[in-house]
Structures are given as C-alpha cells and as structure tokens.
Amino acid sequence: PIRGFGGVASGPAPLEQLHVRIRRILDAHIGRSLSVTAIVDLMNAIGACVVSGNVRRSAEIAFGAADCDEFLDLKDYAKNPRRAEFGWASNNSVFATLGMRYGDVVRRLVANGEPGLQWMQNARAFGRMGEATTRDCRVAGANPCGEQSLESHEVCCLVETFPARHASLQEFLETLESAFLYAKTVTLLPTHWPLTNSVMARNRRVGTSVSGVAQFIAQRGIGRLSEWLRAGYRHVQATDALLAERFGVPRSVKTTCVKPSGSVSLLAGATPGMHHPEARFCVRRVRLPRTSDLLAAVRRAGYPVERDLVDDSSMVVEFPIDYGEHVRSLPQVSLWEQISLAALLQRDWADNQVSCTVTFDPLVEAAAAQVEHALEYFQYALKSVSFLPRMEGGAYKQMPYEAIDSEEYMRRVAGVDPAALRGASAALLGDPEPERFCTNDECAL
C-alpha cells in the first residue's frame, strides 16, 4: 500500500519497461537529432509509466506544426503500429495560424479525431473574443484539455460551477463568488518548482468553468444563457478585484474557461462542460485499479466489470445513466450548432479557452468539407477546438460514453442494487478514473 494518497504500488515492472523504451528510442537516434516522433514517443512512454500504478494520473498534450506530416500521422497506427501501446497517452494538437489551409489537418481528424487545433494568435491577443488585450502575450501552449492557455512552467487552476442547478441568476452569482474565492486562494500555494512559482505569482491564472450547459439551454434557452454568462463574468471580475486587494496579489491575468469535465459533472448530475450527451440513456465507463477495494462492492451491486483493453493495471466498470427529458443528444445537434455554441461561450464567458470537442458523422456526404468550412469560418472566433468522428461502435474500444436505448437502460438498472455500495470505505477505494483516453472531450488519463 502507498502511504499518503492511497492505492497499491505497481511494482518495478512499469519503470523497467519505461527504461527499455527510452533506450530503444535514444539508441535509434545516436549521432543525429531527435525526430518529432522520438520526442512525442519519449513523453508518451513516460505518461504510460506514470499511470501504470493506477493511482497517480497523467494528462499530456503534444503540439506540432500544422504542416508537419510526421506529426500529423502520429496517431495513424496503420503507419505507426508500434505507437499503439503508448500513443494514447497524449492529446495531439497543431498550432494553427489564422488564414491557413486546413485540408491536410482535416483529412487526419476525420479519420480518428486528431489532431486538435490551437490558435495561439487568438490566445495571445484576446481575453474573451472581441476584447483585445496584451496581458497574456507570453502564453506558449495550453493544458491537455485545451481550456487554459499557459506560459512555460505554468500550471492550470480550475474550478467548476453548474448554472442549471440554480433557481436564479443571483444564486449563480453567489456560487461564482465562492468558487472564484477558492480557486484564487489555491494560486497562493507554492509548488516545488521555483520557475512555476514565479509565473503563478505574476499571473494568478484561474479557470472558473461552467458545466451542464446543454441542460441550461434545455431549461431556459440560449438567450438566457448568454445573459447569465455575461453577468457572471462581470461578477467574477469584481470579485477578483476585491480579492486581489485583500490578498495583496495581482489580479488574475485570466479568470474563466469551459472545461470538458468528467467525474465532477457526474457528481452534480450534469452534462459535461458545453457538450451534449451521446444520448438520453448512456453507459458511462469508469476505470479503477485492479487492486481497488471498490471492485468487489460494484460487482456485488451488479454493475458490469471487465478488463481494461489497454492498461492491464485497470478494470472498467459500466454505469447506466439517464440524463432526463428535453436535453438533446449529440445526433440531434449539428456540427455547426456545436461549434457556434463554443464561439458563444468564448465570446460571453471564457477569457481563457473553451474546451470543445465537436462530434460529427464522418460518413455523411462531404463531411470533410463541412469540417474544413467550419474551421475557415470560426478560426476568428475560437482559441482551440477538436473534432471526434462518430463511428459505429465508437472511435475506440471502451469509450467513456456509449449510447443505449431505453430498454437496455431499464435492463441494466433492474440488474443492479446500489445499496450494495453502502459501507464501502472511501479511504480504501483509491482514485476512480472516469476516462482512459484523451479524446479532448474527456481528458484525464
């Protein structure tokens, strides 16, 4: 057992395997510069090792040039079959430039959903889109889910709110005040890296996020959403000014974002971030360490448990979910509507970024052309975006969400006894892992 943060040590095997992989990568480059593939291989191999114990977590993002075919093909496992065993460890995105031709990028993402796109020009030049600023001109990339642009050595600081869970705007503003107070306080804590501390002390960057956006639209409409977001943003700025004076620190360089969300939105019974659910009825997959005491409890309760197809140290548990009536599912929401919602959130709320994964059907006529046209139009309204092709059986095995029909949902619910989970000691459960792959929609590894 691991003292401090729980779990059970995985033993030396993952670290030994990491050293073998690193030697193999570096030996192949003796006498020459590291290739793009080698650089990403090294970071992915380390990420795969870190998650092997199934207690520590790793989330990575690799950025590359939009005109580098080698980088664009890293997730093409037909061309790079050996990368399949660790290539999942990162989101891969390109640094897009305004006005570029998007055809080569679109051809790849239509096939497997990567790479994503990051417009650093917009990230450096704007807070909320349309509000020009030079305060954040040093940003050099973004966090793995794309909701916060970051400087080198900087870490993100995120907090999540759920506007659809509030009866009035005033209640929402009060929640925002408490959430921002918490996040701003976290920025006062030092890390063990002096360079990180210096950047954090200067920027005090916070990402106050909203989730359950699809539910709010279903309840109150998109016009009211825009109204609440703009009022909420003003209140966050006023709160930041007050706290900065009280704490004797600078105002936050940026304050708001839309994170993709995962386990946090599940706890609140909310749809994740800005995204619509796969369907009203879904299977939600959660990963647990093979050594977790929770596995026996979920089996007793009747929830399906199966082996993780990628990570031998994990097991996958399936939970049936009903998002309720009136919330539209992804097949009912067009590519253009999804990306338009991201642009609205980037304009009215997020001075950082909006983590947006646009789901689309790659089999419809001219799907690639639609994606390319959307990028041409919305490159001036977004800071980042990614796409996920909707494929029969999912883009990969054991996806975080899978649509089911009402009959399957009722069958699964009838077979479980949630009461059997009572009494499981939280101290012994370890850290559940809501999702395994970086899909841009769900990112924690």
Image (cartoon, rainbow, N blue to C red):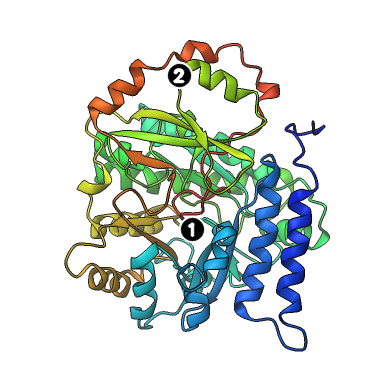
> In the shown orientation, is residue 211 left or right of residue 144?
left
Residue type at mark 2? Gly
Q: How far apart in space, not on screen, are marks 2 and 1 (Cα)?
A: 44 Å
Q: Is residue 4 visible?
A: yes
Q: At x 49% / y 52%, what residue is drawn?
A: 257
Residue 312, x across and y down, in percent: 61, 43
Of the numbered discs in the image, which one, if any, rests on residue 406? none
**Local crowd size for mark 2, using a 10 Å CA cut-off: few (<14), some (14–19), many (≥20):** some
**Considering only order in the chain, which callout, 1 or 2, is on the residue closer to the N terminus?**
2
Of the numbered discs in the image, which one, if any, rests on residue 302? 2
**Local crowd size for mark 1, using a 10 Å CA cut-off: few (<14), some (14–19), many (≥20):** many
Residue 106, x across and y down, in percent: 35, 73
Mark 2 and 1 residues: CB-CB less than 8 Å, in contact?
Answer: no
> Between 229 and 19, which is closer to the camera in this rendering?
19
Q: At x 48% / y 82%, what residue is drawn?
A: 69
> Between 103 and 205, which is closer to the camera in this rendering?
103
Dividing the picture into quarters, in which one does residue 25 lie? bottom right
Of the numbered discs in the image, which one, if any, rests on residue 351? 1
129 in relation to 417, above or below: below
Residue type at mark 1? Asp
> Between 181 and 435, which is closer to the camera in this rendering?
435
Residue 213, x across and y down, in percent: 35, 42
179 in relation to 413, above or below: below
Q: Secondary structure at mark 2?
A: loop
> In the shown orientation, is residue 177 left or right of residue 269?
right
